[in-house]
Image: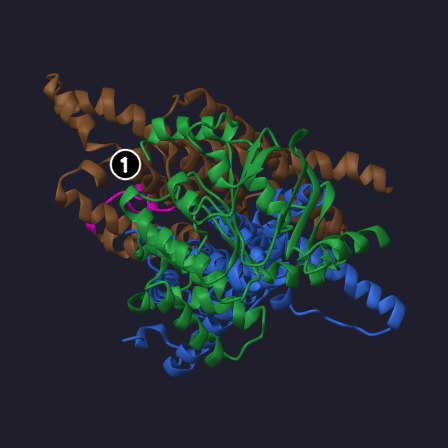
Amino acid sequence: MGTWEFYTEVLIPVLNRGLLLSIKIIIPSAILAVLLGILTGAGRAAGPSWLKKPLDLYVAIFRGTPLVVQLTMWYFGLTSATRWLQPLFEPMGLPAWTWMMFTMRPFTAAIFSFALCGAAYHSEYIRGALLSVKKGQFLAAQSLGFTKLQTFLYITAPVALRRAVPGCGNELIYLIKYSSLAILVTLKELTGSSKHIASLYFRHLECYFLTALYYLAMVTIATWLLNRLERFLTLPGLGRYDA
Amino acid sequence: MTFDQLLTATEPTPPLMEVRNISKSLGGKLILDDVSLSLNRGQLKVLIGPSGSGKSTLLQCIHFLLQPDRGDVILDGKSAWEMSHFNICSFRQKIGMIFQDFNLFDHLTALDNVAIAPRKVKGLRRTEAYQRAKEELARVGLSDKFDHYPAQLSGGQKQRVSIARAMAMDPKIMLLDEPTSALDPELIGEVLNVIAVLAKGGMTMLMVTHQIGFARHLTDEIIFMEAGRVVEQGSPKFLLDDNSESRTALFCSHLTELTGR
Amino acid sequence: MLAFLDIPIVESVLYIIRGTGYTVGLIVGAMATGLIIGLPLAAIQIFGPRWSKALAALYVWFFRGIPIIVLLFLFYFGVFGFIEKLLKTYSGYNVALPPFLASVTALGLVSGAYQSQIFRGTILSLHRGQFIAAKSLGFSTIGTVFHIILPQALRLAIPAWSNEYSILLKDSAVAYLLGTMEIMARIGHLVSITHRHVPFYLLAGLLYFLLTHVGVVALKALERRTRIPGLGNDPQEV
């Protein structure tokens, strides 16, 4: 097989399929991570103190350990935990799904761990942005008769979310790159399919370089979109979130 | 070359520094247009003029911090253009500069700020450099501030440290670029006092300032610049006389009206 | 306590401790490589001529846009494999370049891109008048860099460094894919012997958590010790 045929008939179609799976992992993880991050961040910034402590702990654990460990834990760890649950649940007459529900398919495990880990990072930016809104703004809103919820919805959130955009955007870029970890749970996404072809045809240099270009394209497009979003949301004279 | 020698030979006392026909453009705009002046040993000359007239640029060109497009600076009979990069650094050592916003080194104490250039540029031994730095700081009245960092000093104290820093290099000439204009009014006096002591001690100085009252008493000559050119120069008595219709007097009366100084 | 795992405990603990040594070695090597690349790259991005600025920006764009796994594969199987093949054909030696070296190279090149951004920021935040003042006292360009710019830029970089350290630490966990015998590789090995996933991966998480914490606390202490009044911001609560 010539070099050209290798590219057009093997590598590129396989990488394209891998790319599609990568995107299928990235998009739901991103949406879940941002939503969960906003909830966690809001809880840590303005929630009751009984909520703050456990949320802080959650963020500390998920930011303090490698995503590799988390992903492996969710996938292999839960599967093996099922083995412990079965002898417990079966004698109780419970149906199989009660212990089987703790096992995850690779795809679910990837999205689950990317979303949980990403949310911990997002919540840092959301929390910082919420806390950066000046106290005078609350006082002014309250003097106008806003309730607490109204103050949050109409005054605090619009300013804070804008400030959180650069940081959270950065985190989404990281997510695109770390989606490659899905190879660890046997998924044939972009990196996984590239490794497959590379070791099948012994063409490591070309395969991984082309894969790198695929990721660069994704990251560049995402950066461009996020910059557009940031510019679209900019208010004149309102500074960026100071990282 | 022979003509130059003839010139210097015929003058009664050769000037310590001569600035010849300096021109400089920045960003396509002509900032200095054929400026010449000279300083004799022990002279204090004051440079005044409206903002944007090129005074600061002139000082930086004299110091070769900015390379002039045309013209030359001759210090002690040696032309700056004929020096290599290494010699330019030693040329700069012989000229001290005081900046409007002090430019102290943020990561060094007052004592280290004064001692670092003697140690690292002149290669003085540690003990000697610190001995010297202590003397210079004492001379500007800051013996109690050796271990303070710039952020812990007032504006007036910072400027006095920067004067000590320049003096520790034994400069032949001091260039002062509006040394008091970033200071609160109550702090100006302490800095001007130090400068006056230097002047009386025989230091050769070229100073940009808007402190006309101060300048009038100490200076030998006022140089008035406008739009990159030297418009007038002469003794303060002549230029600032009440009946004088000089541009300088007009400018200074505006200054007095505006600032009340 | 670990008796149910059915493995020699002391040996296992020593085995993992040696892995921790590898992990620390990876990070120290990568941070040093990153520093050596990042400092000149930052200087180029600020002071260099336009073409070199474009090259530096290209470097940063490339290494910031590629997942660490792909870079590890690219360097170990791709570049290192290519070098080994060249050596074999031209010198006849059968050289096997160690995966540790590939990991340090890949992590270090990425860290160089990130550290150049850190130093660019800190150098730009310095008060520029000092550079002119140094020049006016007769400092040469190199003297200004070593006595004025670096002492300040390095100090101001410490908080961002601590961030970079924890990112590198977590990224280094991927190096086991190449067979670098760091924490994850050894934990994985023990898991494959005992078939106990949960306790061992919990242990790995705990180890990384502790390593992150120790590094961050140490850098915080360094920041406090080298702090100069008025230089940079007050240390923030993180």
* Residue C100, image x, y percentages: 60, 68
Is residue C95 something one can see in this rendering?
Answer: yes
Q: Is residue C61 left or right of residue A185?
A: right
Q: Secondary structure at mark 1?
A: helix
What's the residue type where badge 1 is placed?
A: Ser
Specify whether B19 is left or right of C119.
right
The tint of chain C in the picture is: blue
Q: Could you say where residue C78 lies in the image, as x and y percent from the top left?
A: 72, 55
- Picture layout, residue B17 above or below residue A230: below
Query: In terms of depth relative to the viewer, which is nearer, A69 or A98?
Result: A69
Which residue shows up at 22% across the image and 53% down it?
A91
For the point 51% across and 48% down, which residue is it?
Answer: B220
Rendered image quadrant of residue B252: top left
Magenta segment includes A60: no
Closer to the camera, B47 or A196? Answer: B47
Is residue B39 left or right of B176 when viewed as pictured?
A: right
Q: Where is residue C6? Give x, y as percent.
A: 37, 76
* Residue A96 part of the magenta-drawn span: yes
**Residue behind mark 1:** A132
Residue A160 versus residue B167: which sits nearer the camera? B167
Colour for chain A in the figure = brown
Quadrant containing the N terminus of chain C is bottom left
The x and y percentages for residue B186 are 27, 45
Residue under the image location 72 percent in, 59 percent down:
B77
Q: Local crowd at mark 1 within 10 Å, few (<14), some, or many (≥20)?
A: some
- Up-down: is B119 above or below B208? below
**Region in magenta:** A92-103
Instruction: Classify B205 as above or below B251.
Output: below
Chain letter of mark 1 equals: A
Residue lying at 46% horizontally and 26% vertically, measured from the top left: B250
Colour of chain B as rendered: green
> Can residue A77 be seen here?
no
